[in-house]
Image (tube, rainbow, N blue to C red):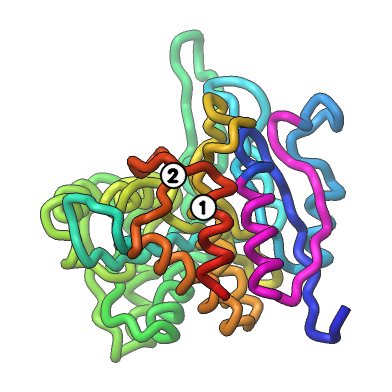
Amino acid sequence: MTAQTRTVTLINGDGIGPEVVDAVRKILEGAKAPLQFEYKDAGAEVANKYGTNLPNETVESVLRNGCGLKGPTATGIGSGQQSANVGLRKRLDLYASLRPVKSVPGVKTRYENVDLVVVRENTEDLYAGIEHIVVPGVVESLKIITEKASTRICRYAFEYAVKKNRKKVSAVHKANIMKLSDGLFLDCFRKVAREFPNIQAEEVIVDNLCMQLVKNPEKYDVMVMENLYGDIVSDLCSGLVGGLGVVPGANIGHSCAVFEAVHGTAPDIAGKGLANPTALLMSTVMMLDWLNMESHARRIENAVWKVYTEGKVKTGDLGGKHNTAEFTKAVIDAMS
């Protein structure tokens, strides 16, 4: 082990998670990235073993290592435990969800040259999960918006724009209806924007944004928003470039970060060797950049783009006939 080697907490997740994680690990080995892995558990499939879908030792591992790489985890709908994803974000204070959305060479969609970034506040809003039954048949959910969380996510968006040479940050809101909660978010955005006079700042109502993204995604650059809007808008943007299978994601805090596949667990193809590891692979590229391993990040990224540009090896989700192992080998070969 060299002095520069970093330890990363590796979480397989559920469904196709172990398959895409294994593919990414092989590609990292092929790129000779100076990483070693500490395997930990999270997700629905380990809940019976631990009594929870997010064991304490997994959280402690990410805290200790400062970095995690995670396959998709399953979440019950309407009942059951809190999502392992939400649990990780809360317990590690991973306040910024970062979702770059970029057109993939060789993946034909209705749009070309899409290059967007969704910055989503990750710790509060309706995702605080504060709900109660008022009377039978009436349920109340509380939307929590704070000055602290709104200010730091807006500052993160502007600092990201500066670092990545982006030109504009758009605040996405519904302050015309939620005048206090979204109004507070907008006030925080305006205050932070004044600190970055070289970055264009604009405000857009969330429903109008969704229409404009479908009509003309080139209008937008970096977009910052509250938790629920971010969940919806980030998936909408993913659809512009081919879906969640080709889009990376990261959850970033002050002291640690978790990089993950943002798609589901695909139980219908789990264990069949058919999964596309691109989303987790591009999240890994983000992780390598975050770890200041830019040369390894570019090596893998360029190899992925080469495979997609040539179009000879494609998995079934993108209209091809190749399996996970064949795609993995193609990326490794493209690095040589």
Seen at 56% across and 43% down, the residue is: 128
Query: Residue furthest toward the top?
Result: 136
Q: CA distance from mark 1 to mark 2?
A: 7 Å
Q: Badge 1 local density, few (<14 within 10 Å), some, or many (20+)?
A: many
SS of the residue under disc 1: helix
| x, y percent for residue 97 | 50, 59
Pick whichever, 107 or 294, lies toward us. Answer: 107
Query: Residue furthest toward the left?
Result: 215
Q: Is residue 273 magenta?
A: no
Tell which circle, 1 or 2, labels the residue nearer the N-terminal end.
Answer: 2
Pick whichever, 186 or 19, lies toward us. Answer: 19
Seen at 41% across and 68% down, the residue is: 306
Is the Cβ of the residue at disc 1 closer than 8 Å to that at disc 2? yes
Seen at 57% across and 55% down, the residue is: 328
Q: Is residue 23 magenta?
A: yes
Quarter in which the N terminus is drawn: bottom right
Q: In the image, which residues are magenta? A: 20-45
Left or right position of 258 against 239? right
From the image, tell me which residue sits under label 1: 327
Seen at 18% across and 66% down, the residue is: 218
Q: Is residue 168 visible?
A: yes
For residue 247, what is the image quadrant?
Answer: bottom left
Q: Amino acid at mark 2?
A: Thr
| x, y percent for residue 201 | 26, 76
| x, y percent for residue 161 | 38, 79
SS of the residue under disc 2: loop
| x, y percent for residue 304 | 46, 65
Q: Amino acid at mark 1?
A: Phe
